[in-house]
Amino acid sequence: MDLQLNTHQLFRVRLFLPKSKNPAYSTDKEVIAGNEIFDNTCVACHNFRTTGIGPNLAGVTREVPEQWLKDFIRNPVEVIQSGDRRGKELFEQYKQYMPPYQHLTDEELNAVLAYIHTRKARPDTPTRTEWGNWF
């Protein structure tokens, strides 16, 4: 996963990348790689503004332990079936299992978490149904 970064990409990442003592959430290249993986793998169900098919992920890296996130991304069914409280609550809320992403390497998974870590928590934005069909 060797990415060439242009000046605009580096500026954008440095501008929004929070300071972190956790090395998994710290490098420019990781964040850009994680953004690309997220856009190709996760964006159909997740975003950082509202709940959709899956939960809003803004701020999740500040609320949930890194190892739990890695375990859940790799094998959500196993986490849920193990009796994990958070996993069971997510399953109850969304009524479906997230697909497992066991094919992601440790490097790719760290990159995805680094990207997600740049997205701070904020309240859910109302959905089209909640706003009505005026837009």
Image (cartoon, grey):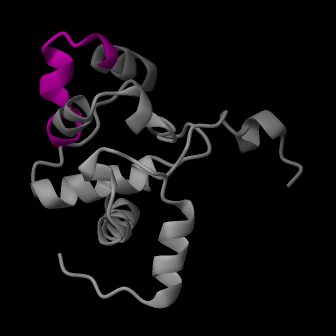
Snapshot quadrant of residue 79: top left
Say if residue 104 shows up in the picture.
no
- Which residue is drawn at the image coordinates 48% and 69% (left, top)? 13
Q: Quadrant of the N terminus?
A: bottom left
Farthest residue in the right direction? Answer: 134
Residue name at image x 48 percent, y 88 percent:
7
In terms of image quadrants, where is residue 126?
top right
* Residue 41 vs residue 62, the one in the foreground: 62
Where in the figure is residue 11, as x and y percent of width and height? 53, 78
When the figure is inspected, residue 117 is found, relative to residue 126, above or below; the finding is below
Q: Which residue is located at x 29 percent, y 44 percent?
A: 22
The quadrant of the picture occupied by the C terminus is bottom right
Query: Residue 12 falls in which quadrant of the image?
Result: bottom right
> Any magenta on residue 81?
yes
Residue 34 in percent (x, y) is at 33, 62
x, y (%) of residue 106? 11, 54
In the rendered structure, does residue 80 fall within the stretch colored magenta? yes
> In the picture provided, is 106 more to the left or to the right than 61?
left
Q: Is residue 33 above or below residue 68?
A: below
**On the rendered structure, is 58 left or right of 34?**
right
The answer to whether residue 58 of the structure is visible from this angle is yes
Relative to 77, is 108 above or below?
A: below
Magenta region's main secondary structure?
helix
- Magenta highlight range: 72-86
Give x and y (percent) for residue 51: 56, 36
